[in-house]
Each structure stands twice: as structure tokens, then as C-alpha cells.
Image: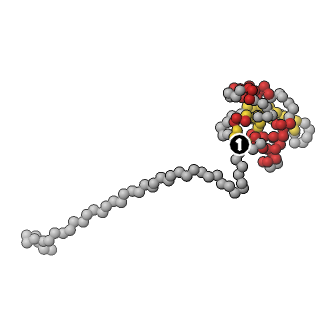
């Protein structure tokens, strides 16, 4: 399955599931994070990371979700198996900006530091020989 298919499957599972077994865990977890209980509506504004990606939203870096247990179909089709999943509230996400295939995000221009240039040492002054006087020997 490619990334897009995984995201779409996660969104479908989240929206079409019928179980309300995790509602208490979700409410308790997000109320503990400071989100009012009136703003927590599972299957409307609480989804997994991949489901949010399918809805065009990105979970912010560093956000901690609420762990829940859910059931998924076994690959061999013989029933379901439990898995742990992490769900995030809409307040923990940001909208993903629509970007074209060739667009590159622009980074703010920062001033470049002036490179350090070491001072050039001066050559020692060369003493010029003086004119010999009558007292001095001539070499």
C-alpha cells in the first residue's frame, strides 16, 4: 500500500467505525491536556496521524496524542486483531498549504556574517646602513 492509500484507509476506518469503546479514554485524555470536553468529538475532530494527513492537516511536531486500542482486519481475512493507535485533536494540527509540484518553500533571508580577516603582520623595518665616518673602518 502506498502512503496515500494508507492515509485514505485510516480516514475511512476513523469515520465509518461504529464502536464507541474508546470515547471515555479519548475524552479523559484530551480533557487532561486542557481541551474542553465540549470541543472533543471523536470521528469529527479526533483522528490518527494518517487520517489527519488524508484530511489535509499536519500534526504539529512535539504534540502528544491519546493512545487508544482499536481493532483492524487481519491480513488473511480470518477476523480482527487489536492494535494501539494514537489519536490527535484538531487543535494539535495545522492546515497543509497547497503547493505545486515545483514549488520550493522560501526561507527568510538572513544577513551573512562578515568573515574574520586576520591582520597581516608587518615586516620588520630594515635598518639602512649609515655612511661610514672617518672614525669607522671601511670594510
Residue wearing tag 1: 95
Name the residue at the right extreme.
78
Q: Is residue 81 in view?
A: no
Per the image, label 1 sits on a secondary structure element best described as strand
Against 29, residue 125 (above or below) is below
Residue 41: x and y, percent?
78, 30
Q: Nearer the viewer, residue 109 or 128?
A: 109
Q: Is residue 34 left or right of residue 15?
A: left
**Which residue: 65% across, 37% down?**
62
Name the residue at the left extreme.
135
Residue 89: x and y, percent?
73, 34
Q: Nearer the viewer, residue 76 or 109?
A: 109
Q: Nearer the viewer, residue 102 or 131?
A: 102
Q: Is residue 18 left or right of residue 38?
A: right
* Among the 4 quarters of the image, the one containing residue 128: bottom left
* Among the 4 quarters of the image, the one containing residue 24: top right
**Which residue: 73% across, 31% down?**
66
Amino acid at each position: 500500500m502506498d502512503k496515500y492509500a494508507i492515509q485514505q484507509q485510516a480516514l475511512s476506518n476513523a469515520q465509518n467505525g461504529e464502536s464507541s469503546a474508546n470515547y471515555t479514554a479519548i475524552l479523559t485524555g484530551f480533557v487532561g491536556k486542557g481541551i474542553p470536553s465540549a470541543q472533543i468529538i471523536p470521528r469529527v475532530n479526533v483522528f490518527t496521524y494518517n487520517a489527519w494527513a488524508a484530511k489535509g492537516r499536519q500534526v504539529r511536531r512535539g504534540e502528544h496524542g491519546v493512545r487508544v486500542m482499536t481493532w483492524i482486519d487481519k491480513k488473511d481475512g480470518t477476523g480482527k486483531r487489536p492494535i494501539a493507535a494514537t489519536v490527535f485533536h484538531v487543535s494539535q494540527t495545522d492546515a497543509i498549504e497547497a503547493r505545486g509540484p515545483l514549488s520550493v518553500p522560501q526561507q527568510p533571508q538572513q544577513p551573512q556574517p562578515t568573515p574574520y580577516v586576520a591582520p597581516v603582520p608587518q615586516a620588520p623595518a630594515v635598518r639602512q646602513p649609515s655612511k661610514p665616518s672617518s672614525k669607522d673602518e671601511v670594510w
